[in-house]
Image (cartoon, rainbow, N blue to C red):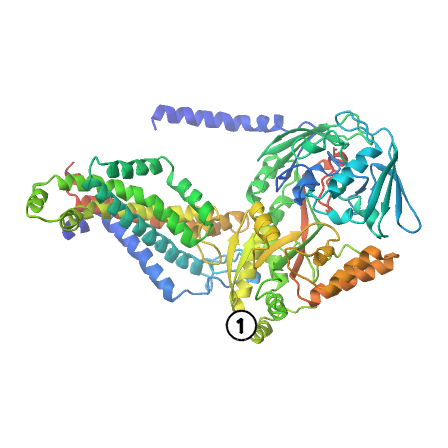
Amino acid sequence: MIHRALRHPSFVVGLAITLMVLLIAILAVFWTPHDPTAIRISARLRPPSATNWLGTDQFGRDVFSMLILGARNALLVGIVAVGIGLSIGVALGMVAATGEGSLLDEGIMRVCDFTFAFPAVLTAILILTFLGPGLVNAIIAIGIFNIPVFARIARGAALQVMARDYIRAARAAGRSTPGILARHVLPNITGILIVQASVQFALAILAEAGLSYLGIGTQPPNPSWGRMLNDSQTFLAQAPTLALFPGAAIALAVLGFNMLGDGLRDVLDPKSLER
Amino acid sequence: MQPVSRRVALSVGLAAMALSIPVSASAQTPKDSVVVCQTLEPPILDPTGGAAAAIREVTYDNIFETLLAFNGEGRIEPRLAEKIDSSADGLTHTITLRAGVTFHDGTPLTADDVKFSFERAMAPDSKNSQKWIFAPIAGIEARDARTVVITLKSAVGDFVDGLAWADATIFSAKSADKAGTEPVGTGPYQFVRWNRGDRLLLKRNDNYWGKKPAIANATFRFISDPQAQVAALTAGDCDAHTNLSAPEAVPQLRANPNLRVTIGRTEGETIVAMNNGKAPFNNPKVREAISMAIDRAQVNEGAISGFGTLIGTHFSPNHPAYVDLTGAVKYDPAAARKLLAEAGFPNGFSATLRLPPPAYAQRGGEIVAAMLGQIGIKVSIEPVQWAQWLERVYRQRDYDLTIVAHVEPLDINIYARDGYYFGYASEAVKDAVARTKSAKTEAERFTAYRDAQRRITADFANVYLFMLPKITVSRAGLKGMWSNWPVPANPLGQLSWE
């Protein structure tokens, strides 16, 4: 499988980009070339130079430092928000699957349908209006709209698996429903969940950037790609390159996770290649 | 996309481009109408029903009029009052109304309307934001149709000046209840329609008692986003913007031959307000440390491109009684850190900075938060909408720090108000403010103002940053926009096209 993966171009490119973003994010935890929150008004809107590799923003902060710390924030949002969606969503989905057609199943799925009726970012904006702006609340909001995505996928996949003979065998052998779910169902739906998670990861990064762009996500002085993009558009006439970097960072990260997801789908599910 | 449809799209696009020159020429505003854009939309249109400056910016001297009025230079001139005779003891003021004034609905203006308007403003349930104007009044008598006699409880030096404020607007008893949404006034323009969230339409009042305005139809458009303001001006969607929120765009707009930019003054003292009533801000040493940690020149540069005038107290440099206290608190983060340690916070503390939407507050807030971080105060920024700001910060006093511009003229009296959102209380300031009211001469009154200024600065009541500039942009050929804002107002009657 590894051999097949390494020959898959979008998997390799996606993995490379993802690893790069990941390494940069880890680097930012320990080191940034400058203090990304240090304001030096006298040095504002400087073009890229040896001291400020990507120039400075409207308050004289180092754009490169902000960008790599922004990567950390973007990944943090992705990991936690997808984690929330994955854990709660999969649990709900599997519970629904065990009682297929029951009132509980119907209830869970109709609530999911209901949330699907609203665009994800709109839901997040609505949630943030109640919770108030901020990074933690943005993570919660993005996490919440991830729940139904995973619930639905987990239910569908679990239903397929549960129709198999070995599940009937396990049941005949006296294994409890939770045991069957944990030992037989979950391992067999992991592949599809991983693929979906990498897609949701890209969406979470995009959503965080969008919310921060609107001013209700990550709050200053904590840097965020979305807010950097918003701030820089005000100064487009004076510093045209300023908007380029956060925009490229968002595009690259989202592209990386999407390509990784595509590649993973093909690698983990060979049938999709044959089709 | 199909090749055919792409070709169609391309030709439509080219046709649009070819047409764009004649289209934009024909879309140009006819010369007897004007579109004035402003940043904030008024929540209501009754200037006596709320503190929002946007109400005054739309209605003052346009829809509504007052007995006296501020002109563009900040001097007070007669409006609905032809003259006011004040008795020697300052207790009786006899107001003679102008003849032949009618409201937009045809009702003639009488002395009863003045009595009604002031009693309405004084009523316990009135939401008037400047009740101090009416506080000294003992009685109002409509002597005849054109004469009003106001008697005061005690002589108040600036009582008559207060009648020029939008909060002393004259309504007709018939239509005052609807003033919030369907205003009927005596002004040169009458209300046509208000599309909430977008624009407000006015038309010339052809029965106006005074000079007939040159512009027949006027539109106020509300554009809060700084970039959208610049785009609307460049595209010609706005004939003027009353106060641009994007100071960084000034060089770009100045380079545009179709636009004129002037940098003027407002009465907007922009401050970092501290909740003096709440720990740790009730400790003067903490407030002093915060004041010393903020480099106001840098905030001015970073937040509004350096267009503001630095101040050291809550008073406008445009006023003759102004004391220059900009040197009273020196920027010195090291000393500030030491002070904070003396106050019992060697490792600093955490505080929340609630910021209203304007760019000066948002950007200034980011700089202030970074500067306070230098002395160990961990500031978390919380952006709020105006309605939330008014409710939580202004009414409930639920805040640590905030940044806001106080745009009313001569508003140092707010430091003497009990229950005001600063939570500041000083007998010395109360006394000084009382003396500004009771002073018999201008010199006495100015001395009292100077005492109050020095006192609040010595108490580090708030951090005084700068006077907000008024960045007026108008289309070449449009004359008469106020370049300064002695009061927030945009009298349309003074506009004309060359």
Instruction: Give the quadrant of residue A71.
Output: bottom left
Question: Viewed as shown, does residue B347 lie left or right of B248?
Answer: left
* Residue that appears at 40% across and 59% down: A69
| Residue B362, percent from left and from top | 56, 53
- Expressed as whole percent of the image width and height from the top left, the position of residue B43 reads 62, 39
Q: Which residue is mark 1?
A: B345
Residue A95 location, quadrant: top left
Residue B220 located left or right of residue B187: left
Q: Residue furthest right?
A: B88
Dot 1 crowding, Cα within 10 Å, few <14, some 14–19, many 20+: some
Asked if residue A59 shows in the view, the reply is no
| B41 horizontally vs A11: left or right | right
Residue B64 % position (x, y): 74, 35
User: Residue under mark 1: which chain is it in?
Assistant: B
On the question of residue B311 being in view, the answer is: yes
Nearer to us in this view, B165 or A56: B165
Three-letter amino acid code at disc 1? Phe
- Residue B224 image-quadrant placement: top right
Helix, strand or loop status at disc 1? loop
Q: Quadrant of the C terminus of chain A?
A: top left
**x and y, in percent, of residue B198 in the image:** 58, 34
Identify the residue shown where x is 41% and y is 44%.
Answer: A124
State the residue in front, B171 or B81: B171
Q: Residue at x 85, y 28 (%)?
A: B100
B35, above or below A40, in the image: above
